[in-house]
Image: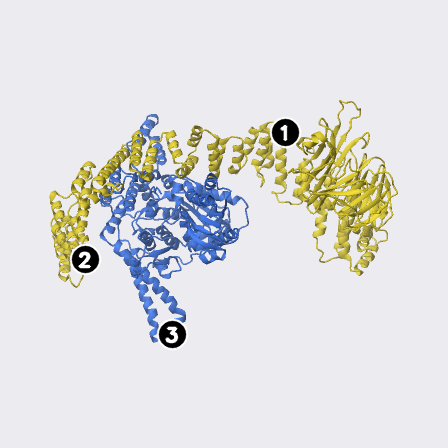
Amino acid sequence: MAHSSRKDAPDLPDFSLLKRIARDQLIYLLEQLPGKKDLFIEADLMSPLDRIANVTTLKEHEVDKLYKVDHKPIYSTSDQLCFLIRPRIQTVKWIADIVNADKAAGKLRSYKIIFSPQKFYACEAVLEEQGIYGDVSTDEWAFHLLPLDDDIISLELPEFFRDNFLGGDQRWVTTAGSALHLLHSVYGPFSKAYGIGRCAKMVYESWREQGKEGEKKTPQSEIGTVFLVDRDVDFVTPLCSQVVYEGLVDDIFRIKCGSVEFTPDVTSSEKSVKVMLNSQDKVFGEIRNEHFSNVFGLLSQKARNLQTAYDRRRGMDIKQMKTFVSEELKGLKQEHHLLSLHIGASESMMKRKTKQDFQELLKTEHSLLEGFEIRECISYIEEHINRQVSMIESLRLLCLLSLTENGLLPKDYRSLKAQYLQSYGTEHLLTFANLRQLGLLVEQQAGETLTVMESKVGKLVNDKTVGKLTDAFSSLAKKSNFRALSKRLALVPKTMEEYDLRTPRDMAYIFSGAYIPLSCKLIEQVLEREGWTGLEEVTRLLNGNEFVGSAGGGSETGRTTDSQRIILVMFLGGCSYSEISALRFLGKEKGYKFIVVTTAIINAARLLEAMLDNYG
Amino acid sequence: MAFVTASWNPLGEAFYRKIELYEMGWNLKEGLRNCQIAAAPYGGPIALLKEPQRSSPSARPQLEIYTSSGSPMASFMWKSGVVKQLGWTISDDLLCVQEDGTVLVYDLFGSFKRHFSMGNELVQSHVLEAKIFHSPYGTGIAVLSGAYRFILATNIEDIKLRRLPEVPGLQGVPSCWTVLSQDRQTKVLLATGADLYILDNTACTPVSPSGFSPQATNIIQVAGSFSYKYLALFTDSGHVWMGSANLKEKLCEVDTKMRTPPTQMAWCWRPKSQQPSVVIMWEKYLLFLALVVLNLLFGYNLDNESVLVPELDSVRIISGTHHELLQEVPVVSEEIFKIASMAPGALLLEAHKEYEKESQKADEYLREIKEQDGLGEAVKQCVEAAGYEHEPETQKMLLRAASFGKCFLSNFRPEQFVSTCRDLRVLNAVRDYTVGIPLTLQQYKQMTVQVLIDRLVYRKLYPLAIEICRYLKIPEYQGVSRVLKHWACCKVQQKEEADEVIARMVSLKLGETAGISYSDIAARAYECGRTELAIKLLEFEPRSGEQVPLLLKMKRSQLALSKAIESGDTDLVYTVVTYLKNEMNRGDFFMTLRNQPIALSLYRQFCKHQEQDTLKDLYNQDDDHQELGNFYVRASYQEGRLDTRMSCLQNAMDEYNKAKNEFNAKATEEEMRLLRFQRRLEEEKGERMVGCSLQDTLHCLLIVGLHKQAEQLYKDFRVPDKRYWWLKLNALAEKEDWEEMEKFSKTKKSPIGYLPFVDVCIKHHNKYEARKYVSKVTPEQKVKAHIAVGDLEGAAEVAIERRNEGEISLVLSHCTATTDRTIVDRLNRTRATAGKK
């Protein structure tokens, strides 16, 4: 990036150690079941597992065949079956069916279930209920953290979001606490911890609790500060259309576990190509955090550079040519390949995103963020629904509308909902119920409860306190208070003055200069102030639950060391690539390095799909 | 050094010494006569069962428990049956084997712990004799029944009774028998007359000791060594046979020339010593036998009745007045103290003595040791010998000498010296009269510090135990915390004190000590029936998770639930919830959950997967009609059959109505109408569309050309005009029915404008049709329309006409400089003039 950045950003700790720990533990678990065995893997554990131990490693430890765990009869001939699954009741029931089917057929096998990252009592209860508790041995693979890149670590638990925020089921809290504990014991001690959100607070406490047992001497600290943030503190950011390259790739092609599958229209060949997207890919490294409008320019620059590198060989003699071929050519070819892929991807994006309707979509989003021409936005959304453009997109716009406007007017809410149901089916009544529960899409209650309460209370006390009480009541109701927050934190730049996306001046560049992501702004503010002081009004608007804690390490002496400027941000409920880009930008500006730990990488589509009631 | 060796007696190659441990603190009028006595090994307690003085039928014997120094610990009237045998377990519990086969277990302080039986047959046949023995498996009991059968239990903590096979021809009580533990098997060795048998699980094998003199007649006494390695047999001819326990190897045979049967026989042998020896006791006479020498070499006269207590490395002799220790003098002690010994240790001791006297001879002695290059050895000897001494004065003397010698060594490793000092300090403390545990260093090493601390804890000597833990720097978890926990567990049993007081005392003393589990202490309180105290104690437990299991046990399920929730451990919450579910009736269970939203949501989550109906009941209980409605909607989509689906929706509608959610009620009602409509259509026209959304249904109808039905739906469901127009437009375009589209466009003024007409035609690549609608487009959108059909000139014209900056740039952005030169120029000109104005 061309902007001025501080050069002294510290180096990141080496997270490949986490992979090694996980691999060693897995191998240990497999060895616990000596002899040949078939391994059944839960579908969404496959990619993470692949990043830890490949098929060869598994075979080395006497894994014979690999299958996906599915609800269907199995055709394994092995007398030892090993299941590697997430602790889900559904999956355990499937396994129970397999075991019971074997029993009925008089087949004798031994079964072992390895729960990752931990087992839950509820799952064991299912085994008990199905009468196979004694037939199956269970174990835990404490595989908490998967490093996706140098600065991204994922828990790969997409259900965290729905379970915790929608279901109110807090069983993942300890898991997140353990993950933090692991990081703390390997890379800690951390000297400061900040956080906001109910879940964040619980995770913090769970981690502290785990830290108490067996206090050990910790090695040299490699991470200074942790920041825990709940996803429900900021829903607006992940719901905005992503326009930074990495985010766009995720929105369009869906990045899965750090790798993406480019379809034939991108590769301009017969087959799809799987590409790992991380800092190893130099081409990608240069454009991942760029606003989309810059990407083409950068890529063509890159292409020119590449051409010059190739061209050098023209004037070479034999000897030079030899070294060129042996040393540089391979790298150039690799780069060439990647470059063509990314150019293909950008082209494909261009086709979709420069179209009229995408521009209009962005315009609507920006209007919503600004709180400007809301009526037009509503009719745009209405048309969007009427034309059945996209089920998820429509929902996304509705949520954005509700969040930014602090709920929809009852009239609008009903009419939009009715139209949505007509377009996409009545079953979405459930989706709407979920969204309402989460506060993503709500009806303004102005006419009813609050005012009734107020007037009742108002009769008893004088006017001044009524204001305060109203505040108290409004914080009870799930309100986004986006407008007020945006004002306080200056999230939306005043006017749409020319924003140079090539040399961004703040984090707003990730949304074309229209909006600074709330989550990242909060982090910036807290780090700047070294706490929440001065942000009281903001935290009140965010329903409180902020905290500061010295994080066990307490080595205040080393404030100037590099590790103090390495900040671990943990998103509970997921974060988007755009937020990561914003943090990278912030880090460059302020001389920090951010490490993002997230329960999963999300985007608007994934967030909203989690809200659907898929009755499977 | 005369005074140290004064009590030494030579026997064979070794010396034996008798050390007085204690003058007994008890006051026994009749000595040890008329009473059963049992003393535990490792300096354990002594139990006495005194027969009543007067032999009236109502008189009862008295059971008394003393420490090894004779301090009373407990005394009570024996009211149970006839006791055949007393004995101690390895964990210092007293076992009383009764005639009827019942074994009563008491603790050190005489409180009854439990009882068990050695077999029902004994009620009839009675116990004739019993022996209590120790093996690697714990403490065992062997009894001989009235039917002359042996019954064995190897571990009283885990009783498995074994009836050993019958001994052929056994018609009376065997003349003597003992229990041996060999090759991981427990066996009984018995003698009847001259015959010896070994009884194991499966068989009774006659055996004969190797080299046993033929003149030997009846075997009347048998003794196994402490480790069951050796065996000694005494015959009525006064001969003693000593050999290995498997009888295959003979060590020696001695004629004692004593014809009277001895009262007791025991091995006195230090492991690693080359000279196993046996002590035989007659009334008032003690005889020593060693294997090397065939003559008995010395004997002691005893003042009064005594008992022998075999130990790992010695034999203790308890009499009515004294408690003595008989042991082989260790080699180092012998070398140091033997008169005129020239061993390095002895010289060092001498040197140190001279040094104290400030005599130059000290130097001479040192030189002598150094000449032999034996200073290191000398120090080692002194340290080692100190460990064997009982008198603190002697210990000090030796250690001082060692310390003196150390000064002249440059690289002597201090560990042995330090650890010996530490061990001796601990040993001296526990050997003290008030504590009364006369352990030797070897016994102490064998039993380990952990066990010693346990024993102190059993004796309720908490302060001493804590002192020792601190002194030896034992980690808190294993040391101080453990002692404190025991203290607290003991404290909670003191019934005379109020709950409040105890709880406060416990928390004061324990405070935040690491590794203390308040829940364990509370569990003990609960066992003693003090539920309230248990709850108070649990409050001190910082880990709420630890409180839960006990609270459940105490049936404080509500409290357990809130504690589980507090702990943040959902697994724990879940455990409690399942427990509650099984314990309570459904109504109460639901009520409990209702007050605990976290538990409730957890349970709901479970029900969603496992028990759908329970979920319904939950909502019903709460009158949560909204959620019930949602529940039925969900159910309807899981349902394949249309009529069940309808009835689910009907239910949902009813619930929504009850919840006063008119919107949802109406939505479900419309869904039902739609389904009915779809079904009818399917029956009439064969179009599959059940389950489609309204929009999709309409689209479907329009595509297949069922315009009338579409029209009907449009009216019935009050589909907004805009939506209908969009739908129809798209459907017609998809069918490429341009004629119909044109007709449609003319039916009335389009609510969506005419730009969509243009767009949709272009989308289906029909520019010709698209142009038809351009003229109809509103002025604001005309530019876009022109551009869409590719008519840049038209677009430019409109833009110029409207003098709209944005539109002009829009057109410009679509122009290419080469082909559209004229247009670009015109636009730029207009822009310039507009700019001037």
Determine the residue positioned at 37% across, 30% down. Answer: B620
Crowd rating for badge 2 (residues with CA inside 10 Å; few <14, some 14–19, many 20+): few
Chain letter of disc 1?
B
Q: Where is residue B199 in the image (x, y as percent from the top left)?
A: 72, 42
**Residue B539 vs residue B117, the one in the foreground:** B117
Between the residue at mark 1 and the residue at mark 2, the CA separation in whole angstroms equals 96 Å
Quadrant in which the N terminus of chain A is drawn = bottom left
Please state if A376 lies on the left or on the right of A319 as rendered: left
Q: Position of residue A70 (x, y in %)?
A: 40, 48
* Left-right relation of B388 to B157: right
Residue at the location (82% across, 30% down)? B30
- How many C-alpha atoms fall within 10 Å of the one at disc 1: few (<14), some, or many (≥20)? few
Q: What residue type is labelled 1?
A: Gln
The residue beneath circle 2 is: B814
Mark 3 — residue?
Answer: A321
Q: Residue at x 62, y 37 (%)?
A: B484
A138 or B496, which is in the foreground?
A138
Q: Is residue A441 above or below residue B535?
A: below
Name which residue type carries label 3. Met
Residue topped by disc 1: B494
In the displayed structure, A161 sits above or below B807; it is above
The answer for how far apart the CA atoms under marks 2 and 3 are is 47 Å
Q: What residue type is labelled 2?
A: His
Q: Mark 2 lies on which chain?
A: B
Q: Which of marks 2 and 3 is in front?
A: 3
Residue B617 shown left or right of residue B480 in the figure:
left
The chain drawn in yellow is B
Q: In the rendered structure, which disc, 1 or 2, sits on the residue that comes first in sequence?
A: 1
Chain to which the residue tagged by mark 3 belongs: A
**Disc 1 and disc 3 on one polypeptide chain:** no
Q: Which SS class for mark 2? A: helix
Residue B40 at x, y percent in the picture = 73, 38
